[in-house]
DNA sequence: AATATTTATTTGGGTTACCAAATTTTTAAA
DNA sequence: TTTAAAAATTTGGTAACCCAAATAAATATT
């Protein structure tokens, strides 16, 4: 699947920095062979850059697991802290932390944790609105990590890792009814399409 | 007990920075009321500065406990990592970490962990070379945290928290013989004077 | 194709964290 | 007290990270 192309403007908007600043930075990254500017001015990561990026993502996600599983933070509270923790240098530390946490395969948002080499073990996942009925499903990730959505899920009592089953699908508005251990919950198609599950 | 006075030169040596740099930094800290330059050019922390410093020390030591107790690092391996971790912002994180670790009162080197307000609960401690014989003693801290000393202690099988007893003191060279669970160990006066114990 | 709009790039500046070398002040020693 | 040494301070500079405004290049629109 082809991802959206990234250019200077897109980056500077995403980072809230001036395009001049971003260009300067990207050029420095290019010197370090972490990025490349394509003939059409698209900015891409080199293999080396991807590897570095995945290592940071790995750290970020492992720290998130720590914060949620060991320090009892909610999954929607950990991002900022993990953003700082991901920059702690030692790779060995993260390795030990990973072991301490029991080698989790996903972070609290359900996103997979790359291994030391940046490999991501990917699971076939499908969005809940098109998943099969009357089968045990596990919530593994979200298509939208906005705070509102996370809070909504919290309120209705759904979380990554939960086992659910679709009991009804309404043709009229494509809402679905699911059942977890305790309750029955009705989800709009909008919500369901942002919840990814495995069988 | 009066501590050695600190001046610009001393600081720049300790930090491996140019005196000009240190002066510039100290002046900035003065603007923030964290330090003061005394008439005799001695640099001191204000109350506000001390509090801030103790908060950082607190974080550092709690992280060290985490690294040693949970990730199985040796006490002499954790300093550099803790130096990075101590700068993670959230105070709440450290509070939770402290709880997760069971509210330790000292770090792996035996140094006390300040509370949230910077208060240090101090224990009466005495150096091993002048401690009483034939009494149960607990090693609580060291007067020298050099890597060589830590490694030496590791080698002879002594660690913070160990319970020992002095069985002999040699007048001749003021060396002492101690006994822990397993062994008898002979320590030079030099070594003993850098090991602090409580009764 | 000609014009308008968007993107990329350049230029000139600001700030912060550094440093080396020069100068001034303080302290210590002769 | 004059001198020598040490410490403090100033001065001038570099590199990193950022910005706003100007210009150039590419893309879209009419």
Image (cartoon, coloured by chain):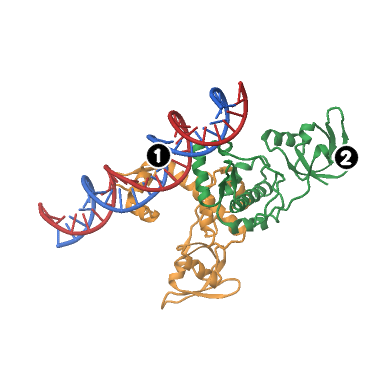
Chain colours: A orange, B green, C red, D blue
Disc 1 is placed on an element classified as loop
Residue B183: x and y in percent read: 84, 36
Please tell me which residue lies in front, A9 or C26. C26
A32 in relation to D2, above or below: below
Chain for numbered disc 2: B
Badge 1: residue crowd in 10 Å (few <14, some 14–19, many ≥20):
some
Which residue is the site of mark 1?
A33
Q: Is residue A119 visible?
A: no
Identify the residue at image location x=78%, y=48%: B124
D15 vs A154: above or below = above
Residue A187: image location, x then y, percent: 48, 73
Q: Nearer the viewer, residue A72 or A166?
A: A72
Q: Where in the figure is residue C2, as x and y percent of width and height?
A: 10, 54
Report which residue position mark 2 lands on. B133
Chain designation of label 1: A
* Marks 2 and 1 on same chain: no
- Tell me if D20 is positioned left or right of A134 in this view: left
User: Badge 2, how many Cα within 10 Å: few under 14, some, many 20+?
Assistant: some
Query: Looking at the image, which residue sits at the far bottom?
Result: A172
Query: As rendered, which of B65 and A173 lies closer to the eye?
Result: B65
Residue B135, label in figure: none
Q: Nearer the viewer, residue B48 or D20?
A: B48
> Which secondary structure lies at badge 2?
loop
Name the residue rendered at 46%, 69% in the picture.
A192
């Amino acid at each position: 699947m082809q991802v959206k192309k990234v250019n200077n403007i897109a980056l500077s908007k995403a980072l809230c920095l001036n395009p001049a600043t971003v260009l300067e930075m990207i050029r420095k990254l290019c010197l370090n062979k972490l990025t490349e500017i394509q003939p059409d001015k698209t900015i891409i990561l080199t293999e080396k850059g991807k590897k570095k990026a995945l290592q940071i993502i790995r750290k970020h996600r492992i720290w998130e697991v720590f914060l949620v599983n060991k320090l009892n933070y909610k999954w929607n509270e950990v991002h900022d802290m993990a953003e700082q923790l991901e920059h702690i240098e030692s790779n060995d530390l993260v390795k030990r932390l990973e072991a301490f946490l029991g080698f989790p395969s996903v972070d609290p948002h359900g996103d997979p944790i790359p291994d030391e080499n940046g490999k991501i073990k990917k699971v076939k996942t499908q969005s809940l609105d098109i998943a099969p009925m009357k089968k045990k499903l596990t919530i593994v990730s979200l298509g939208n990590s906005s705070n509102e959505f996370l809070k909504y899920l919290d309120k209705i009592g759904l979380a990554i890792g939960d086992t659910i089953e679709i009991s009804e699908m309404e043709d009229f508005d494509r809402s679905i009814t699911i059942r977890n251990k305790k309750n029955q919950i009705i989800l709009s198609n909008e919500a369901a399409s942002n919840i990814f599950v495995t069988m």
